[in-house]
Image (cartoon, grey):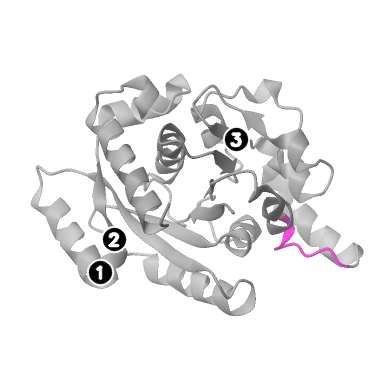
């Protein structure tokens, strides 16, 4: 039975999409069968993993509104053991359409659509990684409802904890009303610059608050990590010997170890 993990933070620019792509690809290299779900209307995960949006016939949008099946929407990537549920700009209107369907169609639960479909995929994959949009709207609600746990990427910057309390409040609300078993898988420190005192101060602050939930692996701020998605590749394919590749493989090993497989 596979595990569904969402990467969520309502702040943009914290390395969420980069981490979704590279964690998923690293798990695949470590012999885990992985489905990467792009739930962001910008579709950066889709293009960042090498999928041409012009070639997409059915996307996660069609899955959410029940006009396509899981089999019709999943795309195999060229990377080992890695599949993607792609997103297109259609997803930008999903919030409104899901709300409308919940009003007009009996039994349609706007926040539970993703769970309905991904539950059927749990036997097909070891891990399902969801890249959430930088907001706490209906799409993120769908992700939290469907997920077993969440990874919170936190950028090593001065305002690192700003907004985290709101996010934790949203997670608690989801636990109470939508998904009682939802857990915090871990907190991932990203964009770390070891040349600054600030970076180390943020690391210590986050670890003092989240304690053992913080991953030992810290993702460094690297130009090569920023470049890789524009080439449609995870870092391990774009620059196999970089510190970024080493970091995300170590993160994947931690995720596997924490889940006992």
Instruction: State yes or no: discs 1 and 2 in contact (Cβ < 8 Å).
Output: yes
Could you say which is closer to the camera, residue 140 or residue 178?
A: 178
Q: Quadrant of the N terminus?
A: bottom right
Residue 51 left/right relative to 253: right
Residue 110 among those drawn in magenta: yes
How far, Cα to Cα, is label 2 from label 3? Answer: 27 Å
**Residue 232 visible in image:** yes
Q: Which residue corresponds to the image point at 79% horizontal and 53% vertical from the top-left? A: 97
Name the N-terminal-most of marks 2 and 3: 3
Badge 3 marks a residue whose secondary structure is strand
Name the N-terminal-most of marks 1 and 3: 3
Residue 161 left/right relative to 74: left
Q: Which residue corresponds to the image point at 74% horizontal and 42% vertical from the top-left? A: 70
Q: Residues within 10 Å of mark 1 (few under 14, many from 20)?
A: few
Badge 1 marks a residue whose secondary structure is helix
Which residue is identified by label 1? 211
Q: Residue 199 location, x and y as percent? A: 16, 51
Stretch of the chain drawn in magenta: 107-113
How far, Cα to Cα, is label 1 from label 3? Answer: 32 Å
Residue 137 left/right relative to 90: left
User: Residue 173 has which mark?
Assistant: none
How far, Cα to Cα, is label 1 from label 2? Answer: 6 Å
Which residue is identified by label 3? 84
Q: Residues within 10 Å of mark 3 (few under 14, many from 20)?
A: many
Which residue is identified by label 2? 214
Q: Residue 223 location, x and y as percent? A: 27, 28
Q: Which residue corresponds to the image point at 54% horizontal and 21% vertical from the top-left? A: 78
Q: Which residue corresponds to the image point at 39% horizontal and 50% vertical from the top-left? A: 256
Badge 2 marks a residue whose secondary structure is strand
């Amino acid at each position: 039975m596979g595990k569904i993990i969402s990467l969520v933070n309502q702040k943009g620019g914290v390395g969420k999409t980069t981490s979704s792509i590279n964690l998923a690809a690293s798990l695949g290299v470590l012999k885990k069968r992985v489905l990467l779900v792009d739930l962001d209307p910008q579709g950066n995960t889709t293009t960042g993993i090498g999928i041409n949006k012009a070639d997409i016939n059915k996307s996660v949008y069609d899955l959410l509104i029940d006009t396509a099946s899981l089999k019709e929407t999943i795309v195999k990537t060229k990377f080992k053991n890695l599949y993607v549920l792609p997103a297109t700009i259609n997803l930008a209107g999903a919030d409104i359409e899901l709300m409308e369907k919940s009003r007009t169609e009996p039994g349609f639960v706007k926040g539970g659509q993703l769970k309905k479909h991904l539950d059927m995929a749990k036997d097909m994959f070891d891990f399902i990684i969801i890249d959430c949009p930088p907001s706490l709207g209906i799409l993120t609600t769908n992700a939290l409802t469907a997920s077993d746990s969440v990874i919170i990427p936190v950028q090593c910057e001065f305002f690192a904890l700003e907004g985290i309390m709101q996010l934790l409040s949203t997670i608690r609300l989801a636990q109470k009303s939508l998904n009682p078993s939802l857990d915090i898988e871990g907190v991932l420190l990203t964009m770390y610059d070891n040349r600054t005192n600030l970076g180390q101060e943020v690391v210590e602050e986050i670890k003092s608050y989240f304690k053992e939930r913080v991953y030992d692996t810290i993702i460094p701020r690297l130009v090569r990590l920023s470049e890789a998605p524009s080439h449609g590749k995870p870092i391990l394919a774009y620059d196999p010997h970089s510190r970024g590749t080493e970091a995300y493989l170590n993160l994947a090993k931690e995720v596997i170890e924490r889940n006992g497989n």
